[in-house]
Image (tube, coloured by chain):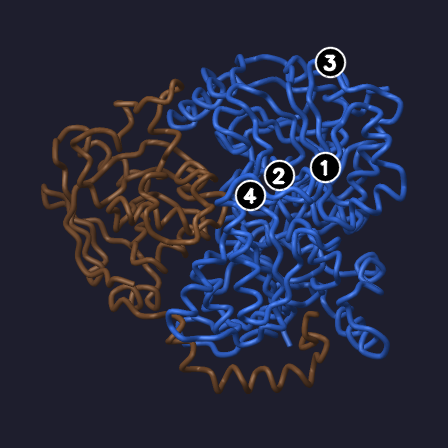
Chain colours: A brown, B blue
Amino acid sequence: MDAFTTLTGLVAPLDRLNVDTDQIIPKQFLKTIKRTGLREGLFYDWRRRKDGSQDPAFFLNQPRYQQASILLTRDNFGCGSSREHAPWALLDQGFRCVLAPSFADIFYNNCFQNGILPVVLKGSDIQALFDGVATHDGYRLTVDLAAQQVTTPEGTAYHFEIDPFRKDCLYRGLDAIGLTLQHAPQIGEYEHRRRTQAPWLFQDVK
Amino acid sequence: MAAQTLFEKIWNDHVVRAESDGTTLLYIDRHLVHEVTSPQAFEGLTVAGRSPRRPGAALAVPDHNVPTTDRRVAIADPISAKQIQTLEDNCRAFGITFFGMNDIRQGVVHVIGPEQGFTLPGMTIVCGDSHTSTHGAFGALAFGIGTSEVEHVLATQCLVQKRPKTMEVRVDGQLSPRCSAKDVILAIIGKIGTAGGTGYVIEYTGSAIRALSMEGRMTLCNMSIEGGARAGMVAPDDTTFTYLKGRPMAPKGALWDQAVAAWRQLSTDPGAKYDAVVELRAETIAPQVTWGTSPGMVTGVDGTVPDPRTMGDEKLRHATERAIEYMALKPGMPIRDIKIDKVFIGSCTNSRIEDLRLAASFAKGKKVAGSVHAMVVPGSGLVKQQAEQEGLDRIFKESGFEWREAGCSMCLAMNADVLQPGERCASTSNRNFEGRQGAGGRTHLVSPAMAVAAAIEGHFVDIRQWS
């Protein structure tokens, strides 16, 4: 996983509530056995009009947002299915950061597994950023993970909260499984103790 | 010891280590695996040269991609076929028990876990699938995870977690006749919203919940995620133990007695505190129908499509307008006037034997409307077999329903069971998102009884008054 330290990037606005992972990447792209190449499926249905042609009104089809690395959106982003294909597709498109007033739990967690920083800001701050994007071409933000800060071109800084452990893993791009495996002896002790208390939990599935 | 909630008891039993900031290494007892969210996890293990810590704690089954038509015929879609074959290959390579497509025990992952007695009270259970919350019906802590965490659990049998908050959802009283667990959970989501449970584990309590069968409790817990909660649970009781006793993977003999004695301790202590409490009266819950493109866009069958012009919040108004447009409805339109094209009875929400018995009891002696295509997809091969032994398949077929093989089917339409653009479906599944059942398709979530009545009448009817 790539580390996330500081990102200065173009912002793309997706002004919708409750964007679910079926919209982020529809079912037909879940048949892959790979993590890569999912960009084609990102917001597949929303990118298209009813006749199947590309909808120029959708933000991802507009030339000004092609190089965006920061997605700005509304409440409860990433609700629905647990598919990790959603952050994989965002990453494949070039997004490394998502800003929203709130996220669904599983999606929020999946972002951290893939080097994407999900940032929660107050609804009024998110609205100010939407206003910024609407009134400036090429609107860029700087996201500083160490300082837990999002800074606008005008110099306004918004502080965000983040769990210290998640922050550290993302900042250093750590292998989460490797970290847990360092505790293998303690996992073994737990299993030994638990097996005595509740032996039915250790019957192998057959 | 301080009074504890059910959740706290299970959580505390599974802490391997906890850091001072609350970051916890949580032990996972059981892991369900399906074809869609696992291939990249197995690939990750291989690349890193790791192997599963406890392959005997996992159970794998293909369900999302499988055809619900004749299984003797090869899968028409080569990409689906490859994904299913990959699961089988990975299970063989890593020593994980696998129920193949032609195994009678195959079915939707959240149907077969309980059916096999793989799911037990007091366990931590995960799966790369958001509807893993279903297993909380047994008084387990069960939640969906992403593929990276599937790999993490395979490699370590643990997950790094922060303790969630707890929410009690109390439903007291008696449900109206013909109202069911599906109506209860849709009404709860209507009340708390699709993000109302975010950050919480829900415990469902109250006399109306106690009165539910295990099938009903599974329907309830299944849709916790649609209310934003990763997990929902019901404390185990005699209903739970009666359901589990004798299941193939449940403990036997003295071990069973020892387990039941431990499980009887799994209830919230008097005086234990939840972080939030929500209350509903069962009598006030009408049969529910979703009208929009989010499960929280729901109302009673006696209600109407809302009018966005009455909504003060601009973002909510826009979302409502967009949903009504997508669904091709009119503000103020009575729900009962909505005509449907398709009916889907199935999914991890409502495809168990009790659901099918109930659906068949309403279908018996009646005919599906000429304008409607209706299908029944049992949750597992064993549910299908049981239903056929009871003659339910004949009732469905005589009424004009198609009777299919087990799988996720039109709940998410990864296989060939797909809505065409513009088609409108009364579905017993769990998500009414845009395009969920097929690009351009329109989904109304309902209970099995409501779905059958809609199939026969061609539009929604109030099941409480339907003859």
Mark 3 is surrounded, within 10 Å at the Cα level, by few (under 14), some (14 to 19) or many (20 or more) other residues, namely few
Q: Earlier in the sequence, mark 1 or mark 3?
A: 3
Residue B402 in the image: above or below residue B2: above
Residue in view at x 81 percent, y 28 percent: B397
Write down the quadrant of residue A99 in the picture. Answer: top left
Name which residue type carries label 3. Gly
Q: CA distance from mark 3 to mark 2?
A: 23 Å
According to the picture, the residue beneath numbered tag 3 turns out to be: B370
Write down the quadrant of residue A116 in the picture. Answer: bottom left
Q: Nearer the viewer, mark 2 or mark 1?
A: 1
Q: Quick one: SS at disc 1? A: loop
With B168 as the anchor, is A83 left or right in this view? left
In the rendered image, residues at marks 1 and 3 fall on the same chain: yes
Q: Nearer the viewer, mark 4 or mark 2?
A: 2
Residue A50 visible? The answer is yes
In the rendered image, residues at marks 4 and 1 fall on the same chain: yes
Name which residue type carries label 1. Arg
Q: Give the percent coordinates (x, y) of residue B233.
A: 66, 55
According to the picture, the residue beneath numbered tag 1 turns out to be: B404
In the rendered image, residues at marks 3 and 2 fall on the same chain: yes
Q: CA distance from mark 4 to mark 2?
A: 23 Å
Q: Earlier in the sequence, mark 4 or mark 2?
A: 4
The numbered dot on residue B409 is: 2
With A33 as the anchor, is A98 left or right in this view? left
